């Protein structure tokens, strides 16, 4: 059973997502840093990733394009600002359809857990409060709703 | 005043971003209360409380009962629901992604066997 995920708003400009994984942090870190691995998990299961480019070094660029089952494309990209192996990744993030009113700063922290697992905390710092709140009152949320209805069904079919 | 959905969310999150205002909401969740009653547990002036109430009212999180002379405030649940729904969309995206990441991590920790050899 997956560990529960928590979403919080630590400040007016931030959203934080925390989740535990049943794997050592080196491995979880790898899944965030290699394009061939990122493309296998980022986005809901019926979305595809038409572009997944990662130049994993400080100053290197990344670019993702996710495509929903009904053809909605969501492109984003940015630059890596800080890479601390198996500990922290800090990068900038801008969406092609600029709902978010500018660049956000994303920090993913990887913490070891006593059980040998890993806790990741992803904090997105938006340019303004309006940007944060605008980020999801968007076509992404609408496009996702369709796929999530299917996912909900799938998850319900899955034994707890 | 008519607000766009985005402006409504701004107002809701702004209103929720202060501990005094959250405490006021928690108090109102137990039943309506006058401004004096709401001010009582806090070490701040009544005008300061009124200012917080104005922000909560603007977000539609509370309303003022006009009928009674002490004009009690009461909690309005709908905007909270919208804020929660908004966070929920975000949560769903990540939940869906992380379930896939769980499966990938499990696969990566499974010793490679003859039927599943991957070149990276």
Image (cartoon, coloured by chain):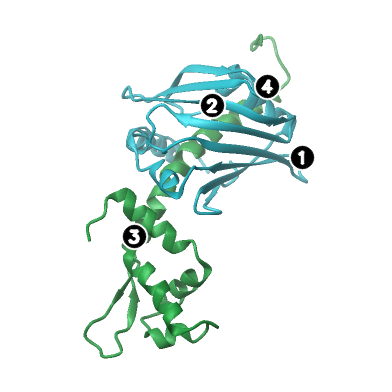
Q: Residue at x 57, y 37 (%)?
A: A106
Disc 1 to disc 2: CB gap under 8 Å: no
Q: What separation in Å lies between label 1 and label 3 (alpha carbons)?
A: 41 Å
The answer to which of marks 1 and 2 sits earlier in the sequence is 2
The residue that disc 2 covers is: A78
Q: Residue at x 37, y 29 (%)?
A: A97
Q: Is residue B46 above or below residue A80?
A: below
Disc 2 to disc 4: CB gap under 8 Å: no
Disc 4 with disc 1 on a shared chain: yes
The residue that disc 4 covers is: A57
Q: Residue at x 26, y 91 (%)?
A: B69
Q: Residues within 10 Å of mark 3 (few under 14, many from 20)?
A: some
Q: What separation in Å lies between label 4 and label 3 (alpha carbons)?
A: 43 Å
Chain identifier, cyan in the render: A
Which chain does the numbered disc 3 sit on? B
Q: Residues within 10 Å of mark 1 (few under 14, many from 20)?
A: few
Q: Position of residue B118 (x, y in %)?
A: 65, 11
Disc 3 with disc 2 on a shared chain: no
Q: Is residue A37 above or below residue B50?
A: above
Q: What separation in Å lies between label 4 and label 1 (alpha carbons)?
A: 27 Å
| Label at residue A32 | none
Q: Give the colour chain B carries in the figure.
A: green
Q: What separation in Å lies between label 2 and label 4 (alpha carbons)?
A: 12 Å
Q: Is residue A6 visible?
A: yes
Given residues B105 and A106, the one toward you in this image is: A106
The residue that disc 1 covers is: A116
Which chain does the numbered disc 2 sit on? A
Given residues B95 and B16, the one toward you in this image is: B16
The residue that disc 3 covers is: B79
């Amino acid at each position: 059973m997956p560990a529960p995920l928590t979403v919080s708003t630590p400040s007016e400009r931030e959203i934080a997502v925390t989740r535990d994984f049943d794997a050592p942090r080196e491995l979880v870190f790898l899944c965030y840093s290699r394009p061939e691995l990122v493309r296998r998990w980022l986005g809901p299961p019926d979305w595809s990733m038409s572009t997944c480019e990662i130049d994993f070094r400080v100053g290197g660029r990344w670019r993702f394009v996710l495509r929903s089952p009904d053809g909605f494309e969501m492109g984003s990209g940015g630059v890596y600002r800080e890479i601390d192996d198996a500990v922290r990744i800090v990068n900038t993030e801008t969406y092609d359809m600029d709902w978010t009113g500018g660049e956000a700063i994303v920090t993913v922290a990887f913490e070891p857990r006593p059980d040998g697992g890993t806790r990741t905390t992803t904090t997105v710092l938006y340019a303004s409060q309006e940007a944060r709140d605008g980020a999801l009152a968007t076509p992404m949320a609408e496009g996702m709703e369709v796929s999530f209805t299917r996912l909900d069904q799938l998850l319900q079919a899955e034994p707890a | 005043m008519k607000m766009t959905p985005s402006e409504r969310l701004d107002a809701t999150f702004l209103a929720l971003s202060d501990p005094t205002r959250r405490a006021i909401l928690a108090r109102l969740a137990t039943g309506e209360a006058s401004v004096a009653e709401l001010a009582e547990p806090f070490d701040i002036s009544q005008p300061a409380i009124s200012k917080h109430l104005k922000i909560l009212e603007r977000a539609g999180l509370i309303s003022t009962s006009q009928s009674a002379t002490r004009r009690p405030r009461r909690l309005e649940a709908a905007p909270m629901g919208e804020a929660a729904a908004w966070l929920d969309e975000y949560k769903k995206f990540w939940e869906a992604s992380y379930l896939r990441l769980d499966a990938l991590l499990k696969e990566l920790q499974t010793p490679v066997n003859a039927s599943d050899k991957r070149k990276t």
